[in-house]
Amino acid sequence: MNAAESVVEAIFEGAPWFVARLMADGPFESDAALLWHAGELARAMPEADQVALLAAHPRIGAPPASVSAMSFHEQGYDRPIDSGALPAQLDRLNDAYESRFGFRFVIFVNGRSRAEIARVMERALTSDRATEKQRGLTDVVAIAADRLRTIREGGQ
């Protein structure tokens, strides 16, 4: 695996088959071109592959020991954690979302608290399946873009 592929593997963790497809279409002239193509690829894939790409991300509120270092930071486990009934509420919302739509809830957390994410999940449950799938795929690429920015700036 070359350096470029290692970076792409890191930003799309858990989806090596997606990385292989993406890298087969490269090389890309810029990070922006890579990310644009990733979004196009994600939207054009068969639905089973789209669902698999969403499933590559951990659940919101997943146990901290079960997530990667990048997800650990993104989900805020390195900051004070919301307490009380919120973990159970997130589990319930994840279950309801997955039951309703048939795929995992993925969102670009971007510093939002778990309580705020719970409110977003509740609103998402009133959406339609196609809209939610496209929103989730868009957020997969937004997460990758943020991870790539972090790597380029010398983070993780």
Image: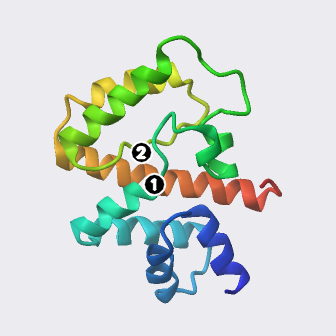
In the figure, is residue 132 to the left or right of 146?
left
Using a 10 Å C-alpha cutoff, classify the residue at mark 2 as few (fewer than 14 neighbours), some (14 to 19) or many (20 or more): many
Residue 84 vs 141, above or below: the answer is above
Q: Quadrant of the N terminus?
A: bottom right
Corner quadrant of residue 47: bottom left
Using a 10 Å C-alpha cutoff, classify the residue at mark 1 as few (fewer than 14 neighbours), some (14 to 19) or many (20 or more): many
Task: Report the residue at 35% width, 63% height from top.
Answer: 52
In the rendering, at what x and y percent does residue 69 appear?
70, 50
Identify the element where label 2 is drawn: loop
Question: Disc 1 and disc 2: Cα gap in Å?
Answer: 7 Å
Identify the element where label 1 is drawn: helix
In the rendering, at what x and y percent does residue 154 appear?
83, 57
In the figure, is residue 77 to the left or right of 63?
right
Instruction: Work out whether mark 1 precedes mark 2 in sequence or the reverse, and give the earlier one.
Output: 2
Label 2 amino acid? Val
Q: Nearer the viewer, residue 111 or 90?
A: 90
Residue 142 vs 90, above or below: the answer is below
In the rendering, at what x and y percent does residue 25 appear?
46, 86
Judging by the rendered image, the residue that carries numbered circle 1 is: 140
Task: Report the residue at 19% width, 39% height from top.
Answer: 100
In the figure, is residue 41 to the left or right of 57?
left
Judging by the rendered image, the residue that carries numbered circle 2 is: 106
Residue furthest to the top:
84
In the rendering, at what x and y percent does residue 117 appear?
46, 27
Q: Nearer the viewer, residue 67 or 121?
A: 67
Q: Are marks 1 and 2 in contact (CB under 8 Å)?
A: yes
Q: How many marks?
A: 2
Q: Quadrant of the C terminus?
A: bottom right
Label 1 amino acid? Val
Corner quadrant of residue 64: top right
